[in-house]
Amino acid sequence: MQKRSSSLGVYERFDGLLLRCAEPQDAERISHYFQSNREYLQPWEPRREEAFYTQFGWSKKLIKLHELHKMGLAYYFLIIDEQTDTMLGTISFSNLTRFPFHACNVGYSLAKNTQGRGVMSRALQVACQYMFHYQNMHRITASYMPHNEKSAKVLKRVGFSIEGEAKDYLLIDGEWRDHVLTSLINLEWQANPNKH
């Protein structure tokens, strides 16, 4: 595994946290995280198949994610407490589009027992800077349900701006849910950045 960020993936240490790309050997770690937080995350996420909560299911999923990382089409990051080596959350960048759009979507989750400590705000800021600096994204979009005040505060702290609302936008916990649409713009974007 790489020990620093590059165009191939993120590896950043900050405030006692490690933000890095998920690797194929992380299946047990990730399945344990989702098993432990299943009930807590359920109202905020799509309904999942049982395989999503198993080590075997994540072993298969991580093979695909690893290929997407290598092709620069998606990135799945883990937030890890460096002192305890505990996985605290995830940040995923999907729907990466290069020229002429240079944009992607971001989604995230945080363990129940990690809420209220500013972990996601710090990790999301580092992750977005990685996408701007190493992946040359111009725009990162995020959405949240109007009643999700925690997510609204995280995105505002990181610098996302509200762009509007979308009715019946995502299928969350088995129902179509309205979402607030936000974006973060890379004000230092360049057409031909130096390769890292």
Image: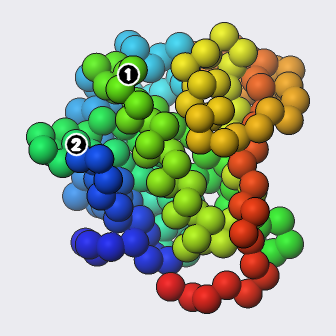
Q: Amino acid at mark 1?
A: Gln
Where 66 sits versus 144, above or below? Answer: below
Left or right of residue 105: residue 85: left
Q: Amino acid at mark 2?
A: Asp
Going from N to C along the chain, the mark reached first, 1 or 2, is 2
Mark 2 secondary-structure assignment: strand
Q: Is residue 36 visible?
A: yes
Q: Position of residue 110 (x, y in %)?
A: 40, 30
Q: How many marks?
A: 2
Question: Callout 2: few (<14), some (14-19), or many (20+) C-alpha neighbours within 10 Å?
Answer: some
Q: Quadrant of residue 111?
A: top left
Q: Position of residue 196 (x, y in %)?
A: 50, 85
Residue at image location 22% in from the left, 42% down from the top? 81
Residue at image location 81% in from the left, 75% down from the top? 99
Question: Callout 1: few (<14), some (14-19), or many (20+) C-alpha neighbours within 10 Å?
Answer: few
Q: Position of residue 105 (x, y in %)?
A: 67, 48
Residue 81: numbered disc: 2
Foreground of the two, 47 or 36: 36
Q: Position of residue 7 (x, y in %)?
A: 50, 77
Residue at image location 60% in from the left, 25% down from the top? 153
Foreground of the two, 159 or 114: 159
Where 196 sits versus 88, above or below? Answer: below
Residue 115: numbered disc: 1
